[in-house]
Image (cartoon, coloured by chain):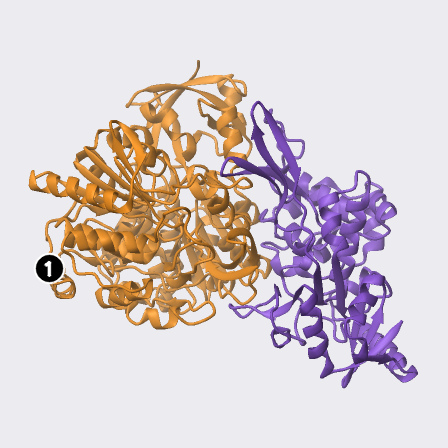
Chain colours: A orange, B purple
Amino acid sequence: MLTVPTTCPFCACGCGFYLLANKGELVGVAPSETHPVSLGRLCARGWGAHEAALWGDRVCQPLVNRNGKLQSASWVEALDYVTGRIKDLIAAGKSIGVLGSPRASNEENFLAGKLARAGFQTNNVDFCFHSICRPLFAGLEDVCGEYAPSISLDDIEASQTILLIEGDLAQTHPRAAFSVMKAVERGAHLITTGYIRTQMARLSSLHLQATPGNKGEVINGLLAAVLHLGLKDRTSVAVDCEGYDALRGDIETVKITEEMRQAAEWIAHAKRATFLMAPTSGHGDQTRNDAAALATLAAITGHLDRPGSGLLPLLARSNVRGACDMGIAPDRLPGNQPLCDGRAQQRLQDLWGKKLPSTRGLEAEDILQSVSGLIVLADDPPSVLPMGQRAMAALGKIEFLVVLDAFVTPTVRIAHAVLPIASSAETEGTLTNMEGRVQRLRVATDPHGEARTGWQVLAELCARFDVNVSYASATDVLREIGQAAPRYARTEQRASDDGWGGRLVKDSDRGKFKLCATAVAALTSAERPHVLVRDGAFDWGRDPLVSFSPTLSRDSQSQRKLFPNGFVEICKQDADGLGVLVGRQVKLTSVHGDAVVPIRVRTDLAPGVLLVPYAFRDHVANVLGTDSVTAVKVEQA
Amino acid sequence: MVFAIQRPSMKKWLEKLLEGGEVIAPVRGPGGDVVFSTISSPAQVVWDFGNPLHPPKQFVLPQTDPLARIKRNGQRHEVEPIYDDARRILFNVRSCDVKGIAFLTRMHEMEPADASYLRRANRLTVISLACNTPCPPGFCVCTDSGPFLSDGYDIQLTDLGKNYLVEVGSEKGEAAVSEAADLFRKATEGELLQRKKLETAARNRFGQETCHFASAMRRISTGRVQDSLWDKMSDWCLECGGCNLVCPTCYCFSVKDLGRDGTWIRCRMWDSCQYAAFTLEASGHNPREHRKERMKRRFFHKVSAQYYTRDSMVGCVGCGRCIKVCLGTTDMPAVVAAIRKGKWHE
C-alpha cells in the first residue's frame, strides 16, 4: 500500500491528506494530523477525494475529430493536428483563446498562460470561474489596491468577532466553517447576513437578514454604526484615507438599527476580527460595491492592518488564487500584476525571450463567443459559467476546440481534439489555497492509459509554437513561476521538501485605502414584487471530481433525476400567499422574459426571495438574462 | 501462555515474521504522521507513538473492497468471488483497535456470514502493544477496551523496559511465537506482577476525557432524549462522515461496480450514516432526511441498550479518533455527555 501525502483538489481551503494506492489503483484517503490546514480533519469531499480518479470516465488516449467523430490517435498525430490547425487559424488572422482552470495546478495554468501570450501572441486568457469571482476581487481592489489576504483559517478560529456575508459556508467551505464553529464555541461573536438562515446563521450571535433588495442598506448601516461609535483610536486610520469625507456624506442618512449598532460594537471593539465574503449574487455592480464596502468596514475598524485580523474572500474551487497568480486573466500577468505594468511586462519578455502582446484580451464568456480556436485546460465551461446553455452553444460554434482533461466532460465530447492529461492524483505540481499557501500535489498512481502530465503536454505545445521551454520536472516550471511572479520566488525550494512543504505567499505591504460605501438600489416594483436570486457560485454536482465519485455524486444526481426541469425555492409564507403548492409549477416573469418551473418550499428563506440553485440556473435563463438577481412576478402556472 | 522476549530480539522476531508474509505496523509516514503500513524492515517500526488516526480496520475492511468479478458470457453474466487470501500480521496495534477488529469480526460472522471479510480476518494475526501511557484523547477505560486487554488478541505485548512480556491468546498467536521459539522464554512471576502494576498505573493516568455510557444508555434507550437536543447538536456537525470512517467499529458501506476492460469489479466502499444520501431512496424519499435524524440514529446504534445486548459492548472502543477528526464538535464523549445531561453548550 502506498501512502502519498498530497493536497485536496476540491475547495480553496487547501486541506492535506494521504492518498492510499494499492497495486496501482487508488483505494482510499487517510487524514493527516500534521498537515497545517487540515490537522486531521477532512470534509466529506476530502474523504472521497480518491473516488473520481478511480471511478471516473477517463480520457485515456489522444482523440481527434475525423469525419465528425472523435477517434483515437497517437500523441504525435494529435499534437501535429492541434499545432497545424491553430497555426492555420493564426495565419488566417483568426483569434485564438486559452482557458485555464482552478482545477489545474499552478504549473499547468502558468504554461497555459505562456502558450497563449508567448505562443499565440494573445491575451485572450481567462478561466471560467473568474466571471463569478471577478466582481468580488474588483471590489476589494477598489479599496485596497492589490489585494491578497494575509490571514489564515487559524486566524478565524482565534477571532473575537466574525462577520460572514451570505453564502452557505458549511456547504461551500466546511474547513472554514469548522474554524468559525470553534471560534463560536470559544465565545466569539458571529454575525451573519443573508437571505437564508443557514447552519452558520443558526449558530450566530446575530443574524442580519439581508435580501438582495436591502443588502446595501445592511452593509452601509454597519459602516454608519461604526463611524457613529466615534472610536477615534480605531477609525483614525480611516481619516487620512481617500474617500473618507465622501463616505461620511454617503452614510449620513443611513438608518442604523439596534442590531447594526450591536454588530458594529462587536466588530470595532474586537482585538481580532475576520470578515468572510463569498462571491455573492447582485444586480449589476452590486457585488463589487458590496465587496468594496465590506473592505471599507474592515479598513475603518483597523482590521486590515492588524495581525490576525483581516478579510478572506471565500473561493469555491481549489486553485482560484493560483490561477489568478499565474496570470490567467486577460488583463493580468503572472504574479497578478496588471498587464499595463511596463516593468512586469518587460520582466516577462526577458524571461520568455519573446515580445508579448500588450492589448487587453477577452474575458472567458467573450472568449467563447468570439474566438475561432480555443484551448480549454481541465474545465467544462457550460457547467461553470453563469449562463451554461449559452456557453454550450458558443462552444459548439467554435471552429477548432482543443481540450486537455483527465475526465470525459460535456466539453470533451464536442471537442475537435482531446489531449488526455493526468488527474490531480497522478501529477506533480502545486496548488495555492485561499490563504496563499502553495502546497504540493504528488503522484499516487500512474496516469490512465496514454495520458501524460498536463505540464508536459503544455510544454510540448509551447515548444511547437517556438516558445522556449526546457523543464525536466514540474519543479522546474515552479522555479520559472518564481522568476515571473516575485511572490513565488524560491517557492520550489520549500515545496520540494519532504513532508507537506507548503509555503505561504505573503501579502505585499499595504498602501492607503480608498474608502467607499455601497450603492443601495431598489430592485422590486409593484409589478414585480419578488426577487429571483441565483443561489451559490458553483455547482459541484457537475464537476468531474464530484460527478464521477460514487459517494459524493448521490445527492446531486438524485436531485437532477427528480427535478429534470429544475426548481425554484420559496418561503412558506410566500407560497401560501400565492396559493402555490409544493411541487406545482409557477410562472416567473422578469424584464428579460419568463419561465415555468416547479416550486419547493423551504422554511429558512427570507420572504420576497425566490432561489434558483446554481445547478438549475439554466432552467430560468430566460428570466435571469445576464443578471444573477432580478425582480420577478410570480404566478400560479 | 505468557513469555518474555528481550528488547533487542524483537528485530530478529520481526525478521522471521517478515519471511512468512506481510507485516503491517505503525511507521512514520512521509508527511510526518504515524500510519499503519506494510513494512519491509524491522527498523521502520515505531515503538513510541500516538495511535495512528487512520484505523487498522482497513486491513480487514478496506475503504475500497473488491468483492466479485462480473464477466459477460454471451447473454449471461458470470460472477466469481474475489478473495484476499494474503497472510498478514498486524503488529504494534493498540488495545482499542484489537477490540474494534473483534467487534467487526463478530458482526460479520452473524448470519449471513460475510465470506469476503472472514477470509481476510481469519488470515490476520493481531499482535497488540498494551498502552503503558494512555493517549491524550483516548477513553478506552470507559469502554473496557484498554489500556490493557484481557482477551481478543492473538498476542499482547507489554513494554517492561529491557524486555517485552508476550501474552499469547490464540493459536495464531502461538504460531507467530513458534516462528522464532528460541527468542522467547517463559515469563517470570516478577514480570507478570510488573505487568499488573503497569496496567493499574495506566488506568490511574487517564486524563479528563471520560465518557459515561451507562446513564446515556438509559436515557437514549428509554426515549428520554428531547428532539430539540438533537436539533441543537446537529447544527454543530458539518456532516463530514469522519467519525464513521475512522471509527474502529463502524462498518456501513455502499456498493458500486468498477468497469475495467470489459469486466466489472463489484466493490464495497466505506460509507457514512451521517451523509444525507446514505439512506436516500430511488424515489427521492429519504427516511432520515434531516441531519438530526441521522445523528440520532448513529448514537442510538452506538449507545442504546438494544445494541449493547446484542454486541455485549457499546459501539465504541474509546480510541478518541472521532474527537480528532470531527469537523464540528459532535464527537462521542461530547454527545454522550449531552445525552446524559440533556444539555448542549449550556
Residue A475, position in %: x, y?
32, 66
Along the line of sight, the residue nearer the viewer: A34 or A220 = A34
A300 left or right, relative to A167? left
A137 left or right, relative to B265? left
Q: Is residue A235 visible?
A: yes
Rendered position, A285 above or below A114:
above
Q: Quadrant of the C terminus of chain A?
A: top left
Along the line of sight, the residue nearer the viewer: A145 or A63 = A63
Q: Which residue in the structure is indicated by mark 1?
A: A354
Q: 10 Å neighbourhood of mark 1: few (<14), some, or many (≥20)?
A: some
Residue reaching furthest to the right = B189
Task: Residue at 16%, 49% (x, y): give it.
Answer: A123
Q: Quadrant of residue A58?
A: top left
Rendered position, A36 above or below A138:
below
Asked which secondary structure carries label 1, the reply is loop
Residue A187, position in %: x, y?
58, 60
Along the line of sight, the residue nearer the viewer: A121 or A293 = A121
Task: Residue at 68%, 74% (x, y): give it.
Answer: B15
Residue reaching furthest to the left = A92
